Image (spheres, rainbow, N blue to C red):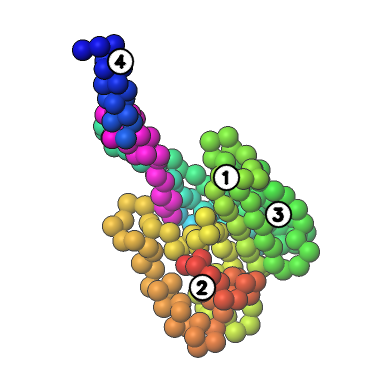
Amino acid sequence: MSNVDLLSASTADQDQSMDGELPSNLNNDINTSQQSAPASTIYQMEFDVEHIGKNRPQNKRQALWRYCIATSSPGVDDSTTICEHVAQLVWSTHSGKYAIKVDGEEVYSNVAKGSVLEHKWRWDHRNACVVDEGGVQMRILACRKPPTRSSKNFRCYEFLVQGKVYRELPRFGSSASRSDDDAFQNEEREYNQGKLMTILDVIEPGWRAKGYA
């Protein structure tokens, strides 16, 4: 076979390789890259409110939301890392001063000018700081006392994570997909009867239709 024929055969083989499937090692690299992105699920754990004022306990309140983030890393062992966190609101209803923290790190502090407060932020759990982009979307709303026309189960404190109400998050350690609190399950029925169920009903009416639940 001449040199020209050898060159033509080599070029044809290269063209066939380019037009056909990718080399197996490159395909493997692409599949590994697509599967390596970790998936996270946020779970509710415990919510509690305490009156912690020195002289008059009811004048200073502390709300705690404990939650955990389970991050799955697809791979050979399909490992899942679970990290517990706590969001905290401390509010002096006498002076109006309040502070919000996550895992003990201050997020924001201010003075509420009325009987209602609200704050939104994004939190980077790894670096324990507020960020402008990325991170986990968070929001706290609170009021001093239930308004008129409210249910006896009215929630004065709400914590939203990634656009979801805390009490709607799946409960950690439970096979249920959401909270099984009877009062919460009957919330829509009472709301349809004209009763306010949460501070969200006051600040943002129609929040249920916006996908928060």
Which marked residue is nearer to the observer: mark 3 or mark 4? 4
The answer to the question of whether label 2 and label 3 lie on touching residues, with beta carbons closer than 8 A, is no
Q: Residue at x 64, y 78 (%)?
A: 147
**Which residues lie in the magenta part?**
20-44
Disc nearer the start of the sequence (2/3)? 3
Q: Position of residue 118 (x, y in %)?
A: 67, 61
Residue topped by disc 3? 98
Question: Secondary structure beneath disc 3?
Answer: strand
Residue in front for this viewpoint, 96 or 127: 127
Q: Residue at x 51, y 73 (%)?
A: 208
Q: Is residue 129 above or below residue 176?
A: above
Q: Position of residue 25 (x, y in %)?
A: 29, 26
Give the side of residue 111 with respect to residue 57, left or right: right
Question: Secondary structure beneath disc 2?
Answer: helix
Q: Residue at x 28, y 31 (%)?
A: 16
Quadrant of the rendered image containing residue 177 = bottom left
Separation (CA) of disc 3 from disc 4: 84 Å
Residue in front for this viewpoint, 113 or 20: 20
Quadrant of the rendered image containing residue 46 = bottom left
The answer to the question of whether label 4 and label 1 lie on touching residues, with beta carbons closer than 8 A, is no
The answer to the question of whether label 3 and label 1 lie on touching residues, with beta carbons closer than 8 A, is no
Name the amino acid, label 2.
Arg
Question: Secondary structure beneath disc 4?
Answer: helix
Residue topped by disc 4? 4
Residue topped by disc 2? 208
Residue topped by disc 1? 134
Disc nearer the start of the sequence (4/1)? 4
